[in-house]
Amino acid sequence: MSAWLGLNQIDHESLQQSTLTLHHAAQLLASTAESLLPSKADDSHTNLGWNKNLQALVTHPIEDRYQLALAYASFSLSILDKGVIKTRFSLSGETREGVYHWLQGTFNKLGIKGGHIKALSRYDIPKHPVQEGRPFSKPIQEILTELAQRRNNAQEIFVSIAPEYPYASSIRTWPHHFDMGVYIPIRRDESHQDLNSIGLGMAVPDGSVNDMYYYVNHWSKQTLTYPNSLPELAGGGHWYQGSWTGAVLPLTVVTAAAQSHDQQEIVQTFFDSAITASLQLIGEV
């Protein structure tokens, strides 16, 4: 794993507001992907990658060439042509209607049917003033930098772990919940259907944890019977048992450590112990 980028604490209100603004900005990418890419049953055509060089969320390639990117630092959209920025559009002060107008016209100029681009409506995300016609407001610069560094670190963690598992998916951000993660089938049957799996991720504050958090969850086709006491977790992690069962590590636990190497050690030991525990719970250890 490459050098860890030191993380800082963010006050809860600023974290909530900034994350929600970025979540809504990411819907612009998901809407464009939904409108311009071939549809997939699992909605994976709308999920997003993280471009570390640009510090940006990016769509899958459109016509094997173009990508729409949301750059954190500048809080702007960019259209990439084979990875190179072709044009940029600042979101600050713009309404959703204005942004969609820009997207439609710009893709039309590229010879792509930009007029098809419209907002996704098949799922709900937490409310934001832009839904009522208010303009986007750029989050505080230091918070944008911090949130980008959190995505950088998470991607590096998952990149270091995924190659150990032959069926691991690519590392993607799903626009509905805005979590960034990797899905890892562990065992498959003769027809290549998954029999069990684990998932690693970094989530934004939600109904499970009122903070950004790392997680490891697990699934089995067979009904799981949990022991009276779940396996112990390292690094300050704990078990969440509600709408799902999984190991979680709030980012406030990580940022409580001042030194970068200590933060990295906390996260690495958490994932090591949580993966081992999850494999144990699905009968793979």
Image: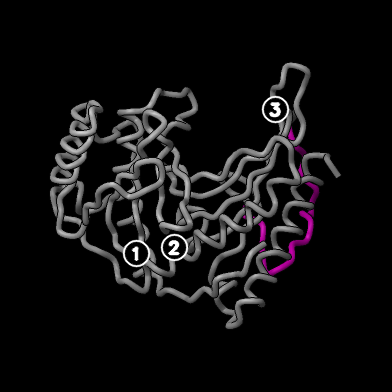
Taking the view exactly as shown, the residue that stands out farthest to the right is 285
Q: Secondary structure at mark 1?
A: loop
- Mark 1: which amino acid? Ala
Q: Secondary structure at mark 2?
A: helix
248 and 31: which is toward the camera: 31
Q: Are marks 2 and 3 in contact (CB under 8 Å)?
A: no
Give above or below for 37 relative to 8. Answer: above
Q: CA distance from mark 1 to mark 2?
A: 8 Å
The image's colouring method is one colour
Tell me residue 133's x, y (percent): 13, 48
* Dot 1 alpha-carbon crowd within 10 angstroms: few under 14, some 14 to 19, many 20 or more: many
211 and 151: which is toward the camera: 151
Q: Nearer the viewer, mark 3 or mark 1?
A: 1
Q: CA distance from mark 2 to mark 3?
A: 33 Å
Which residue is located at x 68 percent, y 54 percent? 160
State which region is magenta.
Answer: 223-240
The dot on residue 186 is: none
* Dot 3 alpha-carbon crowd within 10 angstroms: few under 14, some 14 to 19, many 20 or more: some
- Mark 3: which amino acid? Asp
Which residue is located at x 41 percent, y 35 percent? 61
Which residue is located at x 21 percent, y 62 percent? 137
Q: Are marks 1 and 2 in contact (CB under 8 Å)?
A: yes
Q: Is residue 133 magenta?
A: no
Residue 30 found in image quarter:
top left
Q: Which residue is mark 2?
A: 148
Q: Which residue is mark 3?
A: 194
Q: Which residue is mark 1?
A: 73
Tell me residue 100's x, y (percent): 19, 40
